[in-house]
Image (cartoon, grey):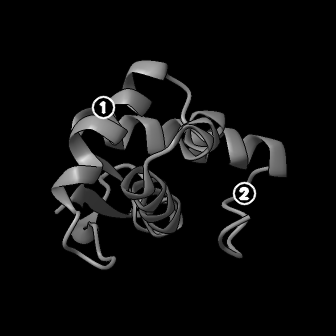
Amino acid sequence: MFGTRKLGRTSDSRKAMLRAMTTYLFENGKIETTFYRAKEVQPVAEKMITLGKKKGLANYRRALAWITKEDVAKKLFDEIAPKYADRNGGYTRVTRIGPRKGDGAEMAVIELI
């Protein structure tokens, strides 16, 4: 996997969560989640955007193997990745927004720049 944080889940559950969060990030542009989850999603999203910049059928299929919705993968290759054509990384930003009311977990927003 990408990071070393277990996030209190089994490996299968963690992978499914990261896939869903990455898909949702590309679909909506930003996610509000806990800080450590955002830090785990960040390298996954960066890698998917890099695949989108390279184009090609093989890279599209690699991205589609991770992203759960086909229309989001198409959006990644047609709209999101070309926007970062002249940029070498740093496609996402994680901003802390303070503690959550219920349990005090540190919250953050991860967004596409």
**Residue 30 at least partly seen:** no
Q: Is residue 110 above or below residue 19?
A: below
Q: Mark 1 belongs to which amino acid?
A: Lys
Q: Name the residue rendered at 25%, 69% in the picture.
A: 93
Q: Mark 2 belongs to which amino acid?
A: Gly
For the N terminus, give its image quadrant.
bottom right
Judged left or right of residue 59, residue 70 is left
Q: Is residue 55 above or below residue 73?
A: below
Q: Position of residue 104 (x, y in %)?
A: 39, 63
Q: Name the residue rendered at 34%, 43% in the picture.
A: 25
How far apart, in angstroms, are the residues tagged by discs 2 and 1? 31 Å
CA neighbours of label 1 inside 10 A, class few (<14), some (14 to 19), many (20+): some
Q: Name the residue rendered at 22%, 57% in the picture.
A: 112
- Closer to the camera: disc 2 or disc 1? 1
Q: Position of residue 67 (x, y in %)?
A: 54, 35
CA neighbours of label 2 inside 10 A, class few (<14), some (14 to 19), many (20+): few
Secondary structure of residue under mark 1 = helix
Out of 91 and 37, give the one closest to the viewer: 91
Q: Position of residue 53 (x, y in %)?
A: 37, 57
Q: Quadrant of residue 63?
A: top right
Q: Quadrant of residue 54?
A: bottom left
* Marker disc for residue 8: 2
Secondary structure of residue under mark 2 = loop
Q: Tell me the residue that label 1 is attached to.
A: 75
Out of 68 and 38, give the one closest to the viewer: 68
Q: Position of residue 111 (x, y in %)?
A: 23, 56
* Marker disc for residue 46: none
Q: Earlier in the sequence, mark 2 or mark 1?
A: 2
